[in-house]
Image (cartoon, coloured by chain):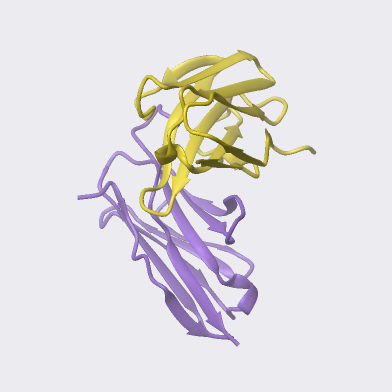
Chain colours: A yellow, B purple
Amino acid sequence: DAGVIQSPRHEVTEMGQEVTLRCKPISGHDYLFWYRQTMMRGLELLIYFNNNVPIDDSGMPEDRFSAKMPNASFSTLKIQPSEPRDSAVYFCASRADRSTNQPQHFGDGTRLSIL
Amino acid sequence: QKEVEQNSGPLSVPEGAIASLNCTYSDRGSQSFFWYRQYSGKSPELIMFIYSNGDKEDGRFTAQLNKASQYVSLLIRDSQPSDSATYLCAVTSQRGTYKYIFGTGTRLKVLA
């Protein structure tokens, strides 16, 4: 089975540029999560979707961040304009909707560097 | 107080020993508890989950949950150098939600 697929794996861009991160969840999974991981703050939940609808975006740091899920097999996280402090590894995860005991499965992440 | 706390380590154990990793959480309504392993530069991968008080064993791994004391632990028996990684504890928040709250992880070093 294909796991969660993220692209790109690495992104290096200059401050002020728009960055778009992409995620394809595991087929049949109804929940999709976006996380950010840094050495200082660990793994932080940014936003999660259920059946393509955003449920909780309280972790989105500011208006420069936006996320969409236009269909069950695709989600994007966009940063515009990007800043050096956005440099981190961004993970996407998905899980099935059978019970709260279902685990989340993570993609390989996107390592983002803003110069 | 952080919602999920772990000792950052590093926890160093000799090869073949038992490694004991601990996690405490603040939300008494938490229902499910997960242990993830993360190698440097890689994504978190699920090792075990537990949601009932007591022990749950899977191979060399045992998860222990004590809801009254609000802690969950992971024991790794016969530790191997390949077990060297950061171990993340994740706790679901109140019943009916699907958010995980992650601890900051404990770095484990198994010395050959």
Q: Could you say which is closer to the camera, residue B84 or residue B57?
A: B84
Q: Could you say which is closer to the camera, residue B81 or residue A81?
A: A81
- Residue A82, horizontal then vertical, whole percent: 47, 29
Q: What residue lies at 47% left-to-right and 16% top-to-bottom?
A: A54
* In this picture, residue A17 sits left or right of residue B20: right
Can residue B99 be seen here?
no
B75 vs A66: above or below: below
- Residue B2, horizontal then vertical, whole percent: 25, 49
B83 vs A22: above or below: below
* In this picture, residue B104 sits left or right of residue B110: left
Q: Quadrant of the N terminus of chain A?
A: top right
Q: Quadrant of residue B89?
A: bottom left
Can residue B22 be seen here?
yes
Q: What residue lies at 56% left-to-right and 57% top-to-bottom?
A: B38
- Residue B68, horizontal then vertical, whole percent: 26, 54
Q: What residue lies at 42% left-to-right and 59% top-to-bottom?
A: B105
A96 vs B61: above or below: above
Q: Quadrant of residue B28?
A: top left
